[in-house]
Image (spheres, rainbow, N blue to C red):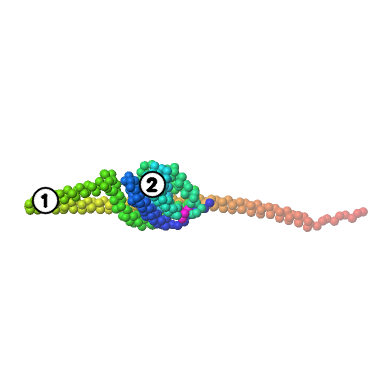
Amino acid sequence: MEATKIEGTAAELRASNGALALRIPGRIEAAANDIIARSPDPAVRHRALAWKAETIPAYFQALFDPDPLVAFVDAWALSFQIQRDLESGPARDMFGPLQPVALDAFRRIQADLDVLALSILGPGRLERARSRVRSWAEENPIEGPLATRPSALPLLAEIAGDHEINLQAAVGTLTASFGDVAARLDTYAAYLPKAARWQAELAVDEIGGREALVQALADLRSLGETGAKAGALMSDAGIRRATAGLAEAARAERVALLAAIDRQRIDTLERVGREREAAFAEIAAERAQVAAAVDRQRALAEGQVEDLRRRTLADLDALSTRIVWKTVLALALLGGVAAAVYAVIARASRPRGRTAPAR
């Protein structure tokens, strides 16, 4: 049976994955924000914040795989795993009465992924592949952090074998990876500030909650007002010294803050640089693998052509030999028949002797 090719190019599939890398985190963030805004329980709000801070990077890790087909199947399997966890797994009561908000978000995410799966597999194969991915998610439930979940790469090989998909995505990777890296960096640039804010909010919750922080700031403000009133009762020299000390402290704080911002900027640039270098290394490795595969296929084809040529020449030689021998035998037989015919004709053409008259 002839293998069915993927409908659409690797570039189109990569572009679809890029769109999903924006849409799916947006749905998760919106659902978590809705739960945080509507829940009166601080524990539920904390879990919603931690949930989006962990789930969104897991989708980035899946959808930004260099192979676009691997990225899609991994994201598809991840969605089934999370949906099963929210429906009947350890997270089924994570958000209390607002659990349907998270479930509705993942039903929408599944619908988005099904649309792309339909364009890849076609209507005749979608339901079978979807059932297999759901079964794999049930066999491999989420246990612990999402970063430790099992890889869905064996699932891709199984789906490809079941549906006879001709995986030709690697050819498009070499020419489109630079644009893919740029799109990934844009996504990270939009996500990193949010991630930093979420981590800060989680840290505040862990040290006593937002209310405790507000109270501490209010106490600090009260202490500052008391100090200002006490300073007003001091002499001019004392006021000048206090003012100078405050100014110096403000300058030191400003310098420290600018230094911290500069360190954060340098750290972000270094991370982006490492990501870019890793992406270029992946591109080079893929290029080398494709070149090696092409060389092996070419050598194999040349060997097969040479073997076929030798067998063809041998068959022609044997056939020509048989034809020559058959021709010689036919000529010999024809000569014998001709000789026999000649002998018969010669015998028939001799004059017959006259018989003696009767007495």
Look at the numbered discs 2 and 1 and tell me whether their residues touch, using CB distance below 8 Å. Answer: no
Q: Which residue is mark 1?
A: 231
In screen coordinates, is 43 left or right of 226?
A: right
Which three-letter amino acid code belongs to the residue tagged 1? Gly
Q: Which residue is mark 2?
A: 97
Magenta part mainly helix, strand or loop?
helix
- Give the magenta range: 117-121
Residue drawn at the location 80% of the way across and 57% of the way down? 351
> Residue 301: where, in percent of width, then height?
47, 52
Characterize the local packing of mark 1: few (<14), some (14-19) or many (20 or more) Cα atoms within 10 angstroms.
some
Residue drawn at the location 11% of the way across and 52% of the way down? 232
In which quadrant is the C terminus drawn? bottom right
In screen coordinates, is 264 left or right of 352?
A: left
Kindly tell me whether residue 161 is visible in this rendering.
no
> Residue 143: where, in percent of width, then height?
38, 42
> Residue 51: where, in percent of width, then height?
35, 47
Q: Is residue 191 magenta?
A: no
In the rendered structure, find residue 167 and report the number of the disc placed on it.
Answer: none
Characterize the local packing of mark 2: few (<14), some (14-19) or many (20 or more) Cα atoms within 10 angstroms.
few
Q: Callout 2: helix, strand or loop? A: helix
Q: Callout 1: helix, strand or loop? A: helix
Residue drawn at the location 77% of the way across and 55% of the way down? 347
Q: Earlier in the sequence, mark 2 or mark 1?
A: 2
Residue drawn at the location 18% of the way across and 53% of the way down? 254
Cα–Cα span, label 2 and label 1: 54 Å
In screen coordinates, is 335 left or right of 40?
A: right
Pick the front one: 179 or 355: 179
Which three-letter amino acid code belongs to the residue tagged 2? Pro
Pick the front one: 97 or 85: 97
